[in-house]
Image: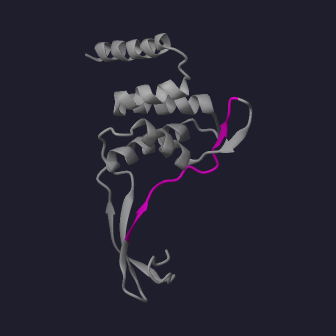
Amino acid sequence: MHCPVCNNQDTKVVDSRLSSDGISIRRRRACDACEHRFSTVEEIALLDTTIIKRDGRREVYNRDKVTQGLRKALEKRSYTEDGFRGLVHYIESDIAKKGSTEITSSNLGDIIMTHLRNFDKVAYIRYASVYRAFEDVQTFQKALDELRSKQKRKK
C-alpha cells in the first residue's frame, strides 16, 4: 500500500479491526518514510462476474454502478455508512451464491430490490420505478400495493 502523503511503497499495518458490521477489516497503517498514519478498508471483491444486459450485451460486474444506483435511490434518506456497506455486501453475497460467472441484469435487479425493500421502503419504490420503468400512476400504485401486502403478511 502506497503512502497517500509521500507515495512511499513501504507501509506497515499497525492495527487491524473487524468493522462493526463484520463485513470488512479496517487496517491502521504507518508509512516507514514519513511516519504518516492512515486507514484502509479491506472488503471481499466479486471478480469475473459478467452481467448479461437485456439487449444481449455483456458487461463486467461493476460495484460502482450498483452503489451509484443505490445511493441515488437512497438520496435524502437516513442511513449509516456501515448499513450501506452491509447492503452492498449482502447483494454481492447473493450474486456469488448463484455459483455462476454470469448473471442477467434482470436477476441482478431482483436481488437488489429484495435487499433494498428490507433496507428502506422509500428507496425500494424509487429504485423499482426506474428498474421496472413505471409508465403511469397505476403501475406505481400496483408496486405500492404489493409492498403494503407484504408488510401486512409479516405482521
Residue 53 in percent (x, y) is at 68, 34
Q: From this viewpoint, which residue is outermost toward the right? A: 56
Please give left or right for residue 96 compared with residue 53 in the image: left
Determine which quarter of the picture holds residue 25. Answer: bottom left
Q: Count up the numbered dots.
A: 0
Q: How is the image coloured?
A: one colour
Is 112 in front, or is 142? 142
The question of residue 43 being in magenta is answered with yes
Report the residue at 52% width, 42% height from top: 66
Q: Which residues are magenta?
A: 39-54
Q: Is residue 112 left or right of residue 150?
A: right
Residue 60 position within the rendered picture, expressed as x and y whole percent measured from the top left = 66, 46
Residue at x 60% of width, y 51% of height: 47
Please identify the residue farthest to the front as the structure is shown. Answer: 136
In the depicted structure, whether residue 25 falls above or below residue 61: below
Q: Residue shown at 48%/45% (left/top)?
A: 67
Relative vertical location of residue 23 with respect to residue 147 in this rendering, above or below: below
Q: Quadrant of the C terminus?
A: top left
Magenta stretch contains residue 133: no
Q: Residue furthest bottom?
A: 33
Position of residue 110 measured from the top left corner of the image (x, y, whole percent): 52, 28
Drawn side of residue 110 relative to residue 19, left or right: right
Q: Is residue 26 above or below residue 134?
A: below
Q: Position of residue 9 (x, y in %)?
A: 51, 81
Asked if residue 154 is positioned above or below residue 92 in the image, the reply reads above
Q: Is residue 65 left or right of residue 127?
A: right
Name the residue: 37% across, 68% down.
27
